[in-house]
Amino acid sequence: MTEIKTEQPEKMAMGRSMKRKEDPRFLQGKGNYIDDINLKNQLYMALVHSPYPHANIKDIDSSAAMEVPGAVAVVTAKELDAHGVGWLPTFHGLDKQMVLANGKVLYQYQEVAACYAETREAAYDMAELVAVDYEPLEVVNDPYKAMTDEVLLRPDREAKTNHIYNWNVGDESGTDAALAASDHVIRQHITFPRVHAAPLEPCGCVAEFDAMGRLQFYVTSQAPHVYRTALFMVLGIPEDKIRVISPDLGGGFGNKVPIYPGYVCAIAGALVLQRPVKWIETRTENMTSSFARDYHMDIEIGASTDGTLTALKVNTVADHGAFDAAADPTKYPAGMFGVVTGSYQFPHAFANLDAYFTNKQPGGVAYRCSFRVTEASYLIERAMDILADDLKMDPTELRRKNFIRKDQFPYQTPLNFVYDSGDYEHTMDVALEKIGYTELLKEQAEKRARGELMGIGFSTFTEVTGAGPSKHFDILGIKMFDGAEIRIHPSGSGIIRTGTKSQGQGHETTWAQIVAEELGLDPQNFIVEEGDTDTAPYGLGTYASRSTPVAGGALALAARKIREKARKIAAHLLEVGEHDLEWKDYKFEVMGVPGQSVTMKEVAFAAYTNPGDNEPGLETTLYYDPPNMVFPHGTYVAVVDVDRETGETKVRRFLAVDDAGTIINPMIVEGQIHGGLTEGFAIAFMQEIAYDEAGNNLATNFTDYLVPTSLESPHWETAATCTPSPHHPIGAKSVGESPNVGSPAAFVNAVIDALSPLGVRHIDMPLSREKVWAAIRNAEQTH
Ligand code: CDP
């Protein structure tokens, strides 16, 4: 792997490509994943799923299932209702979700009954034998059909409509007036199709009520503390009687944020049957229980003839499926979609969104995305290219003309964000130079003259991450700050705990680097512990790239708090006043007396052996409430060749220049970018959770929903620029989701650029060979 080069100075622990501390256990196959956890006397659970997308349930007969050797129990909505747990509030709070189908099913594969047995095999045999009498109903598999309210999907709700909510932001009349006065306006309908986060390890849990009646809940959760509080709210179990333990996770990407019906059924089974219950999702269950994206967007952009932007208007229809199970922060039903003005100066902007129920799986998870940032970023980056094409401008020149300039930060956008920092022009220039844009344009002109289809696509995106400041952000009323605990042992090693939960991002390494840098200690000597609500300080977890912006800030400040205490002990050791000391070259030194110093290691030992009049020990817990979000940005460039005969696209080059502010570990950042680009590549070219007319889900496994291997994936080129966040304690922004957010537009822009000589203006993702082939044939016939 090539190593990303940073523009920042290398320090003792920060900015270094330290090898991942967690890898020895993963590389030896010694990780502790959910299916590695087996409790004495445990039962296994399997779920019955509906083959129909919309149907009344007339009867459920479990007698044949109970004949299976090893069968223990079958539970349906009736039993759950009797215990008051038939419905589950969704995280966002706008809706509730059936745990097991209650009177009717609303999507194909919805959970209908839970079977408990002595073995996994027996549980699955039971699930096949539960006889459900369905009465099929008319299917609504399209939000535009849902909006007519001809078929009402959710009679359980007070409002008798399929419309869930309207959200809008900005100045509509000002935007309309500016559009009307613009020299030039482009209008385009753009869909971001329904996709799935698809972690390689599906979800699962093991639930046990121990001898003291305390729930020990092992679960694949990206947010263990939120689960504990939510379980208290749903099940009424006091929070001290719940311990949530999230073991090693094999990916998450947002899929492991919601509380799934299977979890509630496992807990209910463990409570009633008084035995531990284990449930591990199948691949199909994972593919059909949640989704991401599915935004249908109409965009209008106004510009003057020289390309200066005048206004932006967006109208979106969101397909939320059967339940609005998105885990968006309370005040943000459409997440951070307001970042749709992107990296550009729009004097006027307005965004409107209406969400609808359909007979599709529920969710709206923030798949490697800060709540709908990916949809917003794709839309604006795609639309900027359409505008450039219409104005006959180079897409980089249109962007350069309208970028928010580096001297304009902090920048108030017309859609209510204050961007912290950035230097978009510099990042794009680094990209243009590295990719050799001038030579590529020359090559493209030559190829076009020969009728060959070569495309160059850009995405100069801005993200918003780090939810978030407590004045704006909460989930279930819980404010979105994060805690960090640091304990320094007498020998100068230590343990770090946070409320975040790594799913492969390498927190065990980067958290140690942050603390080690602040304290002048060796990062190798820190253990990082996450995921156990009994030991970790409260925190809202890891999703939406919030770990570094929020928990990373908490860690740096907690380390500084320790340093302040250590200063007192150092003063005692050096027999000076604490204000006579300065923290210099990772040591406490008497000001003006070089050589009169003590190291943190010496202070740590003294904290337990000779603290003087100071409180002994060297430990702290700190909560960090970020003052603002952070706004990473990047320039991505894709170079593609499209085969005119077959429609096959080859991504010849892909360059990602990311600005994540101060980088903690360049190697880990590089890995994050490679992974996210591979996901973006898959979304752009091969993935979609599609439904047929009858509401059948056409993407329920990895033969229909393709996950690229190293064979299909392009070679990724990377580089980094560095504009630190002015308010983050170490100037870091996030990076985990950037490549997934920023790359789809670059891929699609490149393909459309290749097809533009034929007059092709837009094709919705995924850009499969068939779709591109059809677009070429269609264009050839009409031109
Ligand atoms: O929340 P999540 O961990 O998924 O995303 P993130 O905060 O973007 O961090 C992903 C990984 O990259 C973590 O190990 C971070 O510490 C690391 N990172 C880094 O080394 N430097 C940055 N400026 C941002 C993230």
Image (cartoon, grey):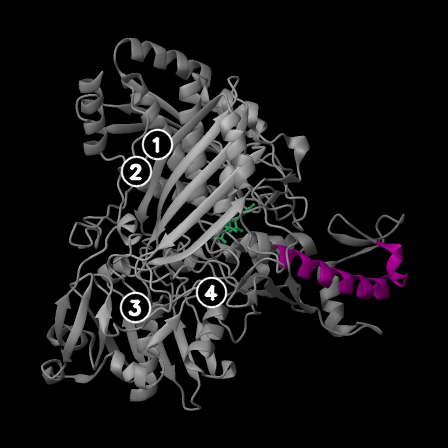
Circles 3 and 2: CB distance less than 8 Å?
Answer: no
Residue 51 image point, x, y percent: 15, 63
- Left or right of residue 763, residue 177 in this image: right
The kind of residue on which mark 2 rests is: Met
Q: Quadrant of the C terminus?
A: top left
Q: Earlier in the sequence, mark 3 or mark 2?
A: 3
**Label 2's element?**
loop
Please tell me how crowded label 4 is: few (under 14), some (14-19), or many (20+) other residues with Cα within 10 Å.
many
Q: Which mark is residue 223?
A: 4
For residue 557: magenta? yes
Give the residue pinned by disc 3.
155
Q: CA distance from mark 4 to mark 1?
A: 33 Å
Circles 1 and 2: CB distance less than 8 Å?
Answer: yes
The kind of residue on which mark 4 rests is: Ala
The kind of residue on which mark 3 rests is: Pro
Magenta range: 553-581
The kind of residue on which mark 1 rests is: Val
**Label 3's element?**
loop
Q: Quadrant of the N terminus?
A: top left
Give the residue pinned by disc 1.
748
Number of numbered discs? 4
